[in-house]
Image: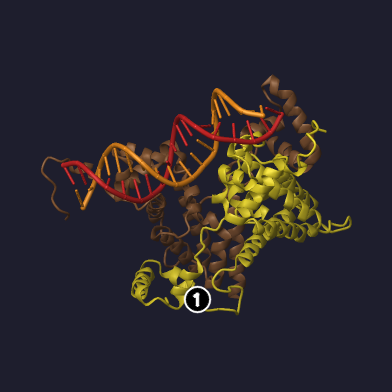
Chain colours: A brown, B yellow, C red, D orange
Amino acid sequence: MTSPRTAGTAPRSVLTRARVLESAVALADREGLGALTMRSLARELGIEAMSLYHHVANKEDLLDGVVDVVAAEIQDAVAQLDPLSDGAPRSAWKPAMRRQILTARAVLLRHPWASTVLETRKNFSLPVIRYYDSLIGLMRRGGFSYDLVHHAMHALGSRALGFSQELFEPDGATAGSAAGGGTKEGADDAATAMLRQMAEQVPHMVEMMAAVSHEDGTGSTLGWCDDQTEFEFGLDIILDGLDRMAERERR
Amino acid sequence: MTSPRTAGTAPRSVLTRARVLESAVALADREGLGALTMRSLARELGIEAMSLYHHVANKEDLLDGVVDVVAAEIQDAVAQLDPLSDGAPRSAWKPAMRRQILTARAVLLRHPWASTVLETRKNFSLPVIRYYDSLIGLMRRGGFSYDLVHHAMHALGSRALGFSQELFEPDGATAGSAAGGGTKEGADDAATAMLRQMAEQVPHMVEMMAAVSHEDGTGSTLGWCDDQTEFEFGLDIILDGLDRMAERERR
DNA sequence: ACCTGAACACCGTTCAAGT
DNA sequence: ACCTGAACACCGTTCAAGT
C-alpha cells in the first residue's frame, strides 16, 4: 500500500509504530520498566534514539501505546472465554465477571510493570475502554441500573483490570524474621531489639503477623501473603456487595 | 545537646532533617511532586543541593521521610477523634473504622501528591504501621480473627489510608462533550464523529455516561463523578462485607 | 562537622543536517 | 520521507576541596 521500497532492502526491517511498541513491551518484560528508556529501546531496535520520534510523539505516547498492546492482549484472552448463553439467569453476571477479571489478571501477571503504567495514564485508549464496556454489559445483564454500574466501576477501581493497589505488602524476609528470627547472627540482636520495640508500638500488627504466619501450609497463606488468594477475597467482597445492591434495586 | 554554635549565628537557620522534610512537603503541596527535586528543594532552603545529603541519604530516603510527615499528620488527626468507649458493642468497630479512614482521607486530600508517593514505598515506616495497627485494633474489637483481619487489610488496600486507585476517571470535559456537545465549533465535528464511533464500539459505556450525566444535581453526581461519594460507596461495600464475615465467624 | 562547586552518568528532547 | 549526530536542559549523585 505504501510507496514501494528499493529492491533488496529487507522489508522486515521497516520500522513501524507496532514494531516499536512490541519491542518496548518485550524490553519491559525482560528488564523492567526502569530499563525502558528511549535510548535503550532504540538500542534494542538497532537504531538511534531520535528515530523513535518518527513513530511515537514522545515518551508519554510510547507508554500510551504500550498500554494498548497489553489491553489488546487482555481483550484477546477475554474473547476466548465462553460467552453468557442467551438463556442465562440474571445471577450469571457475577461468575462471568469474576472469570473475566481473573483472565485480565492472568495477562497482567505476565507483564508485572503494566499496572504501574496503567495507573499513570489519564485518558484511556479504546482498547481499555472496550474492556470496561464488556464489564458494564455484564452488569446490565445482571439487572444493574446505570447509576449502580457507575458506582460499581468506581468501587472496583483497579480490580476491574485484575490488580489491586497493595499498600500492605510485607516481604517474605520481614515476615520470616518476625515469626521465627533471623538467620544472620550479626543482625539477629538488632532484629530482636527492633521486634521488641515494634511489639510495644504496634502490638496488634505484631500479633497478627505471628498468628497468620503460624498457619503455614494449612490455609491460604503460604509464606505470608498469597496475592492471588487475597485478590480474589477482595474481589468477591465487592461482587457480593454489588449483587445484593442489584437485588435491592429490582425490588 | 549538640556542640554549641558560635554566638551570633541565628539558630533557626540550622538545617535539620525535620526542616528538610517540612520544606519538601511544603514544596510538593505548592508546586506538585514533579517540582520536588533535590536541586529545587535546596533552592527553597537557600542552600546547595549537595548539602541535603547530610540530612537525607538520597532521594528515596527523602521520599520516605516525606511520607512519615504525612503519616504523622494523619495520626494527629485520628488521635483527636473520640475513642471507642469501653462499653461499646462489637458492632461499633464499623462506624469507628469508617470515621478513622475518612479522617485519613481528609489529610491526604490536603496533600494530593502523597498517595503517589505512598504507592511507591516498599517498606513502611513506623508512623504508617502505627496507623494500620489502630485499624487492626478496631477490627479485633469487632471480634475479627487475625486471619480475617489479614484478609481485610488486603481487601481494603489503599482505601485503608483514605484513597482509591481510580482507573476510571473521565475528566469533566470529556463527560460534558459526551452528554451535551462541545462548545468549540471547529472541534465539534471531530467530537461528534468520535462519539458516533465510540457509540458503536463501546455502547454500554456511552449509554452509562449519558444516563448518569443527566441526573445533574438530583443525586450524588455533580458534574460527573463525586470522588468523595464514590470513595465512601466502595468503602462501605467492603466494610459491610467484612462485618458479615465477622458475624459468620462468631457463630 | 558541615557545606560547596565542579564534574559524571544518566534522562527526554530540539535542531540542523544528512541520505 | 526517514534517519542521524551533536547539543541542550534537566536529573540524582560522587568526589575532592573548602571552612
Residue B233 quadrant: bottom right
Q: Nearer the viewer, residue B1 or A63?
A: B1
Is the residue A135 above or below the residue A12 in the image?
A: below
Does residue A97 appear anywhere in the picture? yes
Does residue A220 appear anywhere in the picture? no
Is the residue B150 above or below the residue A249 in the image?
A: above
Please report the residue visible at 32 percent of the width from the left and 49 percent of the height from the top: A53
Residue A251 quadrant: bottom right
Please report the residue visible at 57 percent of the width from the left and 66 percent of the height from the top: A151
Residue A64 image point, x, y percent: 41, 53
| Residue count near mark 1 (Cα–Cα under 10 Å), binned few <14, some 14–19, many ≥20 | some
Residue type marked 1: Ala
Residue A46 image point, x, y percent: 29, 37
Please report the residue visible at 38 percent of the width from the left and 51 percent of the height from the top: A58
Q: Kindly give the residue lying farthest to the top in the view shown.
A: A185
Q: Nearer the viewer, residue B234 or A248?
A: B234
Residue A233 image point, x, y percent: 60, 51
Q: Nearer the viewer, residue B51 or B56?
A: B51
Q: Kindly give the residue lying farthest to the right in the view shown.
A: B87
Q: Is residue B203 left or right of residue B108?
A: left
**Which quadrant of the figure contains the N terminus of chain B?**
top right
Q: Nearer the viewer, residue B61 or B104?
A: B61
Q: Is residue B46 left or right of residue B223?
A: right
How many tags in the picture? 1
Query: According to the image, label 1 marks what residue?
Result: B211
Q: Is residue A193 left or right of residue A227?
A: right
Chain assignment, label 1: B
Q: Secondary structure at mark 1?
A: helix
Residue B125 image point, x, y percent: 69, 41
Is the residue B80 above or below the residue C18 in the image?
A: below
